[in-house]
Each structure stands twice: as C-alpha cells, then as structure tokens.
Image (spheres, rainbow, N blue to C red):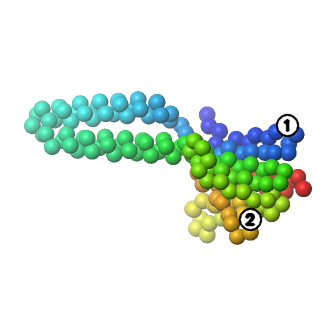
Amino acid sequence: MWAIVVEMVCDPAGSDCRWVIRPNQSLSWRGALRIYLVITICVMGTALAFALHGFWPVLPFAGLELIALGTAFYLCLSRSQNREVVSVGASVVTVEKGRHEPQEHWECPRAWARVLLEQSPIAWYPSRLSIAYQERRVEIGRFLHEAERRELADALEQAIRGRD
C-alpha cells in the first residue's frame, strides 16, 4: 500500500485548490524508537559479551555505532516531516514550505505564474518542477518520483490556466 504523497483539496465551488506535498514516511517515530531499542540491546549485549572475554575495545566502537545509527534515524525522520503547500486562489498562487509551520513563503499573481518542468541534461538525474514569476522561482516536489512530478505539473498548470 502506497502512502499519499500529494494530496489535492479543492473547495466545493472549485475556486481555490491546494496541494499538500510531503515525503513518503513509511516509519513512524514510535516505530523507529522500537527498532532502535532492539538494535541497541543486541549491539550492547554482544559488545558486553566481548568485553567480558577481554575484548574491551569493542565497547566504545559499539557506542559510536549506536550514536551514528540514532543520528541517521533522527535525520531521516525529521526530513520526512517536511511539507510543501501549493495554493492556487482566484488571484494568487502561494507556496509555503516547512516542517510544523511555514518557514518559507512565496507568492505571485496567478495570471503571471508559470509552471516549469525542466528535464535534466543528464539522463538519470530527476527533473525539476518549479513555479516561476518574472525572474523569481520556487522549486517544489524535490522528493517526488518522476511520474508524480509530471502529474503534479499537469494538475498545477490546469489549475493556474484553467480558470481565466
């Protein structure tokens, strides 16, 4: 089962649409903590067994390994909390980015907004989706798969140009 990565919400009149774009988070904080605790018990149990047999230098390395693993879990899970909200209103296009609250805010007149989907010159690099106005632009959907990025570009283009 796939998690919803791009969620579109429109008001009943259809005048305002909003897309909430987020990374796919397949592991919750609670689940990660459980896995980390199980790994910690196994690693420290093994390290203590080696230490009791005279191989005490194993203990600091086991500790460093657990610190590195905990840091990796934290960084991955905190990045999965990022959200991008793209709103297309009657007269303005707004993009907000952040974790728990908007940390970046960008807006432009809907009549002048352009949706750009730029293919990379290198075949295996992903395309870049952005909304542009004059010389300013904001990139969205960096963590989406290529097909999802194309679908989002089409939906945004339709919403921006569809109601003139």
Quadrant of residue 106 within the rendered picture: bottom right
Residue identified by numbered label 1: 12
Q: Find residue 38 and report its horizontal and vertical position in percent.
A: 35, 30
Label 1 sits on a secondary structure element that is loop
In primary-sequence order, the first of circles 1 and 2 is 1
- Of 3 and 11, the residue lying toward us: 11
Indicate whether 16 appears above or below 32: below
Q: Which residue lies under the disc numbered 2? A: 133
Considering the numbered disc 2 on the image, is that residue within a helix, a strand or a loop?
A: strand
Q: Residue at x 40, y 45 (%)?
A: 72
Instruction: Let me know if residue 102 appears in the view.
Output: yes
Task: Give above or below for 39 relative to 123.
Answer: above
Q: Quadrant of residue 101?
A: top right
Circle 1: is it few (<14), some (14-19), or many (20+) Cα within 10 Å?
few
Q: Position of residue 107 (x, y in %)?
A: 72, 57
Residues under labels 1 and 2: Cα distance?
28 Å
Q: At x 31% / y 33%, what residue is drawn?
A: 40
Inspect the image, locate mark 2, and give the three-letter code of the amino acid beneath it. Answer: Tyr
